[in-house]
Amino acid sequence: MVIGAGMGAMTAAARLAVAGHRVVVHECAETYGGALGRVERDGFAFDTGPALLHLPAVYRDLFVKTGKQPLEDCVELSQVEPAVRHVFADGTAVDLPNASRAGVAEALDAALGPGAGARWSAFMNRAREAWDRTRRPLLEEPLWPNWQVLAEREPYPAVAERRLFRRERRAATLAEIGAYELGGEPRLCALLEHFALAHGLDPRTAPASAAVLPYLEQTFGTWSVRGGLRALAAAVYERCLARRVEFAFGSAVTRIAVKDGGAAGVELADGTVVDADFVVAGVAPGVLERLLPGERVRAEGEVPAQGGPGGPGRPSRLTVLLALRGARPEGTPHRTVVHAPDRDAELNRLFDAPGAGTAPPAVTVLRPDDATVVPDAGHEAVTLTATVPAYAGGPDGAARDAFAAQAEQMIARAERAVPGLRDRLLWHEVRTPVDVAEATGADGGAVPAPALAAADGRLLHPANSTSLRGLFAVGGWAHPGGGLPHAGMSGTLAAGLIVEGPEFRGSQ
């Protein structure tokens, strides 16, 4: 039995079906995909969740292991070139090539001055060491029972800065890497810190191990899917159907049944109780606790849930969907990051005094070269995203008004990437953290970050197994955390633990 039809849940369902289990997925919504939502209007189509794919090997492995038809036979993947354009606060712009370390260094030297590329390359070499040390335990293996080892050890090999007559210092956070190892160059620092902000992390407190985030993207590349990432969700759903997974949409689970100290099935909204040998829950922590009133989901000493009641809050995402008249200009980058004019003010608004102030945010502008998302060649579909504080409660109307004002700021900032945007605008829609909360069940519409080592374990996520026998957790709020590749791995790990038992040690 699987609760939810998000990407982690469907990955687990497909793998369990191949292993011989009868799998039934109960999804309270009327469709699959979880965070990979879609808005269609007047011939335009927009992803409302992630829009680019990193580490596609996770889904290639899923399709190989669940059938003879490879992923590329089911969806059309393309490497995005350039991977991204960055427009910094001072107006400097740089296009970074896809999956080319040497090319990135050359581009940084050309845009930021000689030496910028060498500093970034040296940092990426150290980031590779952090990746090599954490890849298996944080992505490919079930969470270690002695997870405290991951919490205590910093895998990033920070460089000691020797200072005359003063103690040497080493970077312990991502912001300190920028200050100590990137020479404090403001644009290099902004580039580095963007990888934290894009995942809702404060670069001033994110551990140095967060260096794996730029390493992952710049090493394994950035990919687009024709039709948007919703097409990837559709392909995984079709693969589940081909493996005879059953789906019940509009089927809300209200309680997980417990018998003899273990999960024994689910109770549906109409009172029907459906028995099951195993239950896989692809829901947010607060939802999971509500499905198990009076039961302990996590034992003492386990990694605490980040998004559940009592857990620390997480930022959310504000998304603006723009329907534009006029064709997409030739050579337009798929993704442009327009950095905030005042980084300190943005960090204060996000993390020190959430929601306070009117500092314009950093905005990611997505302009896909995809004929399937526009009514014809004379129009363009553009998506803007920004990291914002999660919805803190109160009247929905007031919250939506505040988010609408931020959306206007985002449109104004996006004009640095889309000249003449206002004149081309036909209409726009705003997707707020309130909408994210309604779609995912996460408190305040919070969006989970990927699991990271060090930082006393506060950026780890609870294990896929739970303290309740037969109950397993998948999705962004379980190990190995948020992000599309990580969601897929959570489903792989949960299925492995069910099929092989506690001795399962991860993918090979």
Image (cartoon, rainbow, N blue to C red):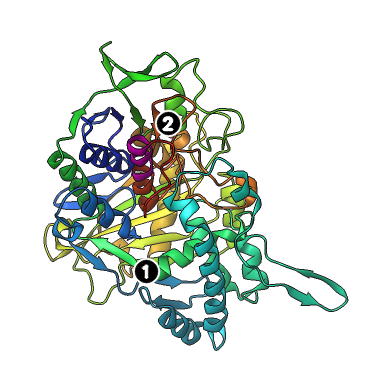
Q: Which residues are magenta?
A: 492-500
Disc on res. 332: none
User: Measured from the top left, where is residue 203 in percent x and y?
Assistant: 59, 58
Looking at the picture, which amino acid does disc 2 mark?
A: Asp
- The magenta stretch spans residue 493: yes
Residue 72 vertical placement versus 230 (above, below): below
Q: Secondary structure at mark 2?
A: helix
Q: Quadrant of the C terminus?
A: bottom left
Residue at the image point whose x is 52% and y is 78% from the top? 121
Cα gap from disc 1 to disc 2, whole angstroms: 31 Å
Residue 353 at least partly seen: no
Identify residue for label 2.
Answer: 396
First-in-chain label (1 vs 2) = 2
Figure check: 1 above or below 352: above
Q: Mark 2, residues whose alpha carbon is within 10 Å: few (<14), some, or many (≥20)?
A: few
Q: Which mark is residue 417?
A: 1
**Residue 474, quarter of picture:** top left
Q: Secondary structure at mark 1?
A: loop
Judge the density around disc 1: few (<14), some (14-19), many (≥20) Cα neighbours within 10 Å: many
Question: Against 457, is 111 above or below?
Answer: below
Q: 384 or 271, which lies in front?
A: 271
Tell me residue 447's x, y (percent): 45, 44
Relative depth, front residue between 290 and 278? 278
